[in-house]
Image: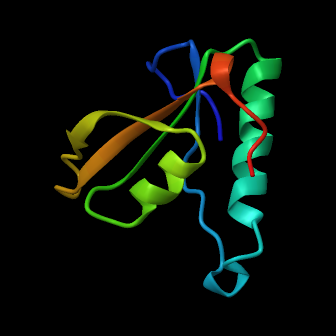
């Protein structure tokens, strides 16, 4: 997690958040997202942002946590299409 060089300074960016599949259904992903959102608030950021590979079930997961669709992009390095997501911290509720 960190500020991306050249990115919008109003946001904190999550990069490479990966959890072990054996930890599914234990809420570890939610806990990590909540910690990142709390850190972003401490840093006076307005958004928590991430991107995910387009066309995966992760979109439903992240939107259930309060992230909103913010666009798509293609990465030149690998041609992957990514969905851009952001969580407005001003309306953030405790994650369930």
Q: Where residue 41 sits in the image (x, y, percent)?
A: 76, 21
Q: Where residue 83 sits in the image (x, y, percent)?
A: 31, 45
Closest to the observer, 79 or 82: 82
> As displayed, is residue 5 above or below residue 33?
above
Display coloring: rainbow
Quadrant in the rendering for residue 13: top right
Q: What residue is drawn where x is 60% and y is 27%?
A: 3
Q: Quadrant of the N terminus?
A: top right
**Left or right of 63, for residue 27:** right
Closest to the observer, 75 or 63: 63
Quadrant in the rendering for residue 55: bottom left
Q: What residue is drawn where x is 33% and y is 66%?
A: 56
Q: Where residue 34 sits in the image (x, y, percent)?
A: 76, 43
Q: What residue is drawn where x is 60% and y is 66%?
A: 18
**Left or right of 77, for residue 13:** right
**Left or right of 30, for residue 75:** left
Total numbered labels: 0
- Toward the bottom, the furthest residue is 22
Q: Where residue 96 sits in the image (x, y, percent)?
A: 75, 52
């Amino acid at each position: 997690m960190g500020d991306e060089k050249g990115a919008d300074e109003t946001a904190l960016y999550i990069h490479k958040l990966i959890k072990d599949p054996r930890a599914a259904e234990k809420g570890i992903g939610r806990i990590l997202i909540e910690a990142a959102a709390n850190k972003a608030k401490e840093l006076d950021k307005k958004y928590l942002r991430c991107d995910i590979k387009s066309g995966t079930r992760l979109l439903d997961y992240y939107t259930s946590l309060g992230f909103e669709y913010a666009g798509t992009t293609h990465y030149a390095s690998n041609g992957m299409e990514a969905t851009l997501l952001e969580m407005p911290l001003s309306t953030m509720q405790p994650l369930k």
